[in-house]
Image (tube, helix red, strand yellow):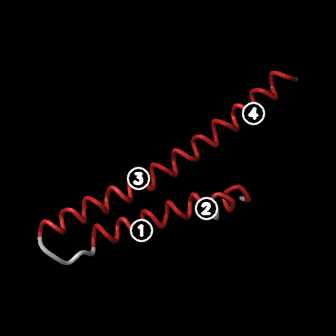
Amino acid sequence: MSNLIKKLTSRKFLLAVVGTVSGLALAMGVDGSEIENIVATIGGIVTAASSIIAYINGEAKIDAASAGKENANAEQS
């Protein structure tokens, strides 16, 4: 439970949430011409997706580093 709370309050996660929410807001709430709406929608989707991808990539690197430390400790024993 402590690990879950730590992940939910991490800066990476919070920034991913903010990026996703702002991207979705951009994608759904733009007034203007049709072309502006299309560009804003695509930009919003890209912003939301890139926030999620960056968070997953960061967590994967942390997990890989952690696994490397565990393997090194196991080999030394």
Q: How many numbered circles does the render carry? A: 4
Question: Is the residue 52 above or below the residue 41 in the image?
Answer: above
Quadrant of the rendered image containing residue 26: bottom left
**Residue type at tag 2:** Arg
Which residue is found at the position 70% from the left and 38% from the top? 66
Question: Which mark sits nearer the N-terminus, 1 or 3?
Answer: 1
Is disc 2 placed on a helix, strand or loop?
helix
N-terminal-most mark, 1 or 2: 2
* Residue identifier under label 3: 50
Q: Do the numbered discs 4 and 2 sit on residues whose CB atoms are within 8 Å?
A: no
**Location of residue 74 with respect to 42 vertically, above or below:** above
Looking at the rendered structure, the secondary structure element under dot 1 is helix
Q: Which percent across, then down, holds residue 24?
A: 35, 66
Q: Which mark is residue 11?
A: 2
For discs 1 and 2, the disc positioned in front in the rendered view: 2
Q: Between marks 1 and 3, how big is the CA–CA gap?
A: 12 Å
Q: Disc 4 or 3, which lies upstream in sequence?
A: 3
The amino acid at mark 4 is Lys
Tell me the amino acid under the disc marked 3: Ser
Q: Which residue is mark 4?
A: 69
Q: Is residue 59 above or below residue 65?
A: below
Q: Pinpoint residue 55: horizontal percent, then vertical percent.
A: 52, 52
Residue 11, image quadrant: bottom right
| Mark 4–mark 3 distance (CA, rounded to whole Å) | 29 Å
Q: Residue at x 69, y 60 (%)?
A: 6
- On screen, residue 75 versus residue 39, left or right, reads right
Q: Is residue 42 left or right of residue 8?
A: left
Q: Residue at x 24, y 65 (%)?
A: 40
Residue 23: x and y in percent read 36, 65
- Looking at the image, tell me whether mark 4 or mark 1 is earlier in sequence order: 1
User: Dot 4: few (<14), some (14–19), or many (≥20) neighbours within 10 Å?
Assistant: few
Q: Residues within 10 Å of mark 2 (few under 14, many from 20)?
A: few
